[in-house]
Image (cartoon, rainbow, N blue to C red):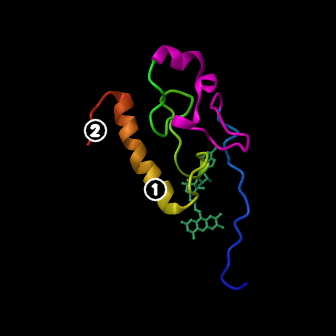
Amino acid sequence: MPGAALFVGATPAAGWLEDIAVYDDGFVLTDTQLDGALLGATWAELGPRPLPFETSQPLVFAVGDVRSRSMKRVAAAVGDGASAIRSVHTALGSAGP
Ligand SMILES: Cc1cc2nc3c(=O)[nH]c(=O)nc-3n(C[C@H](O)[C@H](O)[C@H](O)COP(=O)(O)OP(=O)(O)OC[C@H]3O[C@@H](n4cnc5c(N)ncnc54)[C@H](O)[C@@H]3O)c2cc1C
């Protein structure tokens, strides 16, 4: 079929991440994808759930293709990155733009 691109699967290069919860397929879990069992004692102490794009590791954020259930498109990855900035500002305690 001319002009068709096969996109049958991908392997995330996330094996080097330590102590960060990933789904069965290796993609990084963030925010609402993380339940109590995955969050553990650190988050119980911190209180609030992870911010949007925040991983199971406080102050570590994941955006783009490596994030579990992300759209796997350039525009989505760029949007993730731009949106995650708000969470970074919140985490750092500043209001941001
Ligand atoms: C064949 C193909 C065609 C596609 N066509 C389209 C298309 O037409 N339109 C579209 O919107 N999307 C397309 N996509 C998807 C698009 O490429 C991705 O959604 C987008 O590139 C995701 O951006 P990202 O920054 O999340 O990840 P990436 O672009 O994959 O960037 C991740 C970067 O991190 C680097 N990296 C990995 N591990 C490490 C490490 N340990 N240390 C340092 N660096 C590291 C990698 O080398 C890479 O440069 C296509 C993808 C493929 C594979």
Report how far apart the C-alphas of labels 2 and 1 lie in the structure: 19 Å
Quadrant holding ligand 1?
A: bottom right
The disc, 2 or 1, on the residue closer to the chain's N-terminal end is 1
Locate residue 80, reporting x and y percent.
Answer: 46, 50
Label 2 crowd (10 A; few <14 / some 14-19 / many >=20): few
Locate residue 64, reporting x and y percent.
Answer: 54, 51
Locate residue 67, reporting x and y percent.
Answer: 58, 46
What SS does tag 1 mark? helix
Comparing 91 with 48, the one in front is 48
Q: Residue at x 39, y 36 (%)?
A: 88
Confirm or reject: label 2 Cβ below 8 Å from ligand 1. no
Name of the residue lying farthest toward the bottom: 2
Q: Quadrant of residue 68?
A: top right
Magenta stretch holds residue 9 = no
Q: What segment carries the magenta color?
A: 18-46
Comparing 68 with 12, the one in front is 68
Instruction: Tell me the amino acid under the disc marked 1.
Output: Val
Relative side of 37 to 84, left or right = right
Instruction: Tell me the amino acid under the disc marked 2.
Output: Gly
What SS does tag 2 mark? loop
Which dot marks residue 78? 1
Q: Residue at x 61, y 48 (%)?
A: 66
Label 1 crowd (10 A; few <14 / some 14-19 / many >=20): few
Q: Residue at x 44, y 33 (%)?
A: 51
Q: Quadrant of residue 85?
A: top left
Provide the residue designation for mark 2.
96
Quarter of the image for the C terminus: give it. top left
Which dot marks residue 95? none
Comparing 50 with 11, the one in front is 50
Magenta stretch holds residue 29 = yes
